[in-house]
Image (cartoon, grey):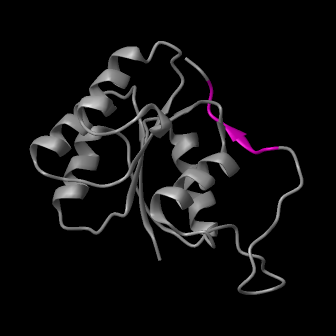
Amino acid sequence: MPRVLVVDDELEMVLVLQKFFTRCGCDVSTASHGANALKILESGTKIDILILDMRMPVMRGVTLLKEMDTRGIKLPVIVLTGSLNFSGFAETMQVLGYSEDDIVFKPVDLEMLLGKVREKLGMKDLGLKNKSRPGKTVSRKRKPMRIGQRR
């Protein structure tokens, strides 16, 4: 079961992502800012992927990425942002070994986000579980589920 750490200061975003990834078969931990996330990462809790907002109080996302690099914490990261002006942190991310492909803009399309998580973890079968047919994932033919908003 993949372990996801969701870091965002918007409670609604955290709750929706937690519920979504739990239904996809993930074990989800959450933090409301980078400092709390760093405590979780340093606690020895196994985390497979980090889903991280850039704009947060206490410790911003880019600061968390720098702290992770300084402390030798390496894991796949997907960055969420509502800002269209992201060139500054995009450059920092590249210096730290991440790419612009690791950035997802709000509002977030959950299916697209799930696709990025699948790709980063190499888990093609990760998805919403079909309660009527255990072991099968749900195929969606509806409008994309979007959460969050641009700031």
Image quadrant assignment for residue 115: bottom right
Task: Return the x and y of residue 118 as percentages of the image width and height.
Answer: 55, 61
- Give me the residue at 66% from left, 47% from top: 112
- Give me the residue at 49% from left, 37% from top: 101
Task: Return the x and y of residue 80 as percentages of the image width and height.
Answer: 49, 35
User: Is 32 contained in the magenta span?
Assistant: no
- Give me the residue at 57% from left, 61% from top: 21
- Residue sitting farthest toward the top: 85
Q: Is residue 58 visible?
A: no
Q: Is residue 33 visible?
A: yes
Task: Return the x and y of residue 121 as percentages of the image width and height.
Answer: 46, 63
**95 above or below 87?**
below
Q: Is residue 85 left or right of residue 105?
A: left
Instruction: Give the main secondary structure, helix, strand or loop, of the magenta stretch.
Output: loop
Task: Return the x and y of residue 44 as percentages of the image width and height.
Answer: 19, 67
Q: Is residue 115 left or right of residue 71?
A: right
**96 above or below 57?**
below
In magenta, the rendered stretch is 144-149
* Quarter occupied by the C terminus: top right
Q: Is residue 55 left or right of residue 118?
A: left
Instruction: Please tell me which residue lies in front, 28 or 134.
Output: 134
**75 above or below 143?**
below
Image quadrant assignment for residue 66: top left
- Residue sitting farthest toward the left: 71
Image quadrant assignment for residue 135: bottom right
**36 above or below 85?**
below
